[in-house]
Image: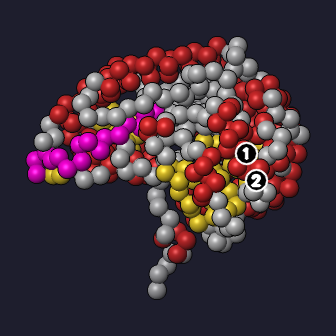
Amino acid sequence: MEILSNRILEMAESETLAMTAKARELKAQGRDVISLSIGEPDFNTPDRVKVAAKKAIDDNFTHYPPVPGYPDLREAVCQKFKRDNGLDFKPEQIVVSTGAKQSIYQLAQVLINPGDEAIIPTPFWVSYKEIVRVAGGKCVFVKTSIDNDFKVTPEQLEAAITPKTKLIMFSSPSNPTGMLYTKEELRGIADVVARHPNVFVMADEIYEHINFVGKHESIAQFDDVKDRVITVNGVAKGFAMTGWRIGFIAAPLVIAKACNKLQGQITSATCSIAQKATVEAMLMDPTTSEDIINMRETFRKRRDMVFQMLSAIPGLKVRMPQGAFYFFPDVSAYYGKSFNGNEIKNSTDMAFYLLNEANVATVMGSAFGDDACIRLSYATSEDLLREALRRIAEALANLK
């Protein structure tokens, strides 16, 4: 008799976390591995946020908070949405969770019934598909093209919607591609959603503040669909607070209440100290905060350098990311080539070839729904990036 449930046996492991763990394992064995696999800013949390956390400890915020988050934090999140996005929410529409991943998981649990369909443009963040499947839903993948900056078109969405469609899930700026949707492109998506009153949209905006092309645009800005949009955000990426584990949703009240109900049964409120620190983060205006601006500009400089180096490698197809801190190059020109008798057939072969032969950890594109590509994170120093890309170029040149 099988001990474990079918639910967990059928769930795929997070490939990004698996590759990061493999890189750490090899480094512990003495290998000089450069990891470009993890999606984590290599910056420290801003000092003013750390000061707020220390004060919270001294002020004895060490007891159970309200399940959806402290009132002052939910109010600060509302102020953030108004200031940064022009969106009006009430505190009762905000649910603070232990990271944006929990926020997305809870959303799927409260919206999706067995057999419901969730449309996910590919490439997508690795956990979307498993979160939908564990809720009993069916993933409907819509393939995008590198030639269109990996962005889904309204026509593609319209063609994918069926009477069973319940949810559309996407991120902007995107993990893994770094691309983002313009206001006009989001308006086109909203027009489709407006024609289907039973379809909801999950907009994952966790990389909002790492945007190199201008103002971030939210699909919730459009009045004809805002009551069916759930905006997911948090402090991990834009504030270098990955370890604090704070994410949140802004949602229609009925959905926020449902997520609050579910959270009350599984984790209750997230860390009280992290919540108080996040209040301070929410007060940081991204247009004036030196911490946010300096991190974004550092990423911009790295992005430009990596683009130049990747573009110089024969056979790679590369697009310039507009946000986040990833490249998603098409490496399929090397499929069918070999090194020491080992043929590269797909993105998994490529990722392990680069790990074993170049000592560079990347993530296979198949994890994100596009087997032609691999994902590289440039959230590390310029020196390490230069060396990693030199190794990658050398390893690819050795494939015959």
Find numbered disc 1 in the image and state the secondary structure of the residue it sits on.
helix
In this rendering, the answer to whether 234 lies above or below 225 is: above
142 displayed left or right of 327? right
Q: Residue 42, image x and y in percent?
A: 49, 27
Residue situated in front as seen by the camera: 94 or 176: 176
Q: Which mark is residue 195?
A: 2
8 displayed left or right of 96? left
Q: Residue 218, image x and y in percent?
A: 71, 35
Q: Which mark is residue 256?
A: none
Q: Who's the residue at 17% across and 34% down the image?
A: 397
User: Splitting the image into 4 quarters, where does residue 376 fall?
Assistant: top left
What is the number of callouts on the image?
Answer: 2
Marks 2 and 1, Cα distance to the nearest angstrom? 7 Å
Q: Can residue 272 be spotted in the picture?
A: no
Q: Which residue is disc 1 drawn over?
A: 191
Q: Residue 315, image x and y in percent?
A: 26, 35
Find numbered disc 2 in the image and state the secondary structure of the residue it sits on.
loop
User: Splitting the image into 4 quarters, where does residue 264 fall?
Assistant: bottom right
Q: Are marks 2 and 1 in contact (CB under 8 Å)?
A: yes
Of all residues, the one furthest to the left in this rendering is 340
Q: Can residue 2 be spotted in the picture?
A: yes
Which amino acid lies under the numbered mark 2 shown in the image of this protein? Arg
Residue situated in front as seen by the camera: 358 or 335: 335
354 displayed left or right of 142? left
In this rendering, the answer to whether 143 lies above or below 377 is: below
Q: Who's the residue at 67% across and 44% down the image?
A: 189
Which amino acid lies under the numbered mark 1 shown in the image of this protein? Asp
Image quarter hosting the C terminus:
top left
Residue situated in front as seen by the camera: 263 or 369: 369
Range of residues picked out in magenta: 326-341
| Residue 284 sits inside the magenta stretch | no
Q: Who's the residue at 60% across and 57% down the image?
A: 159
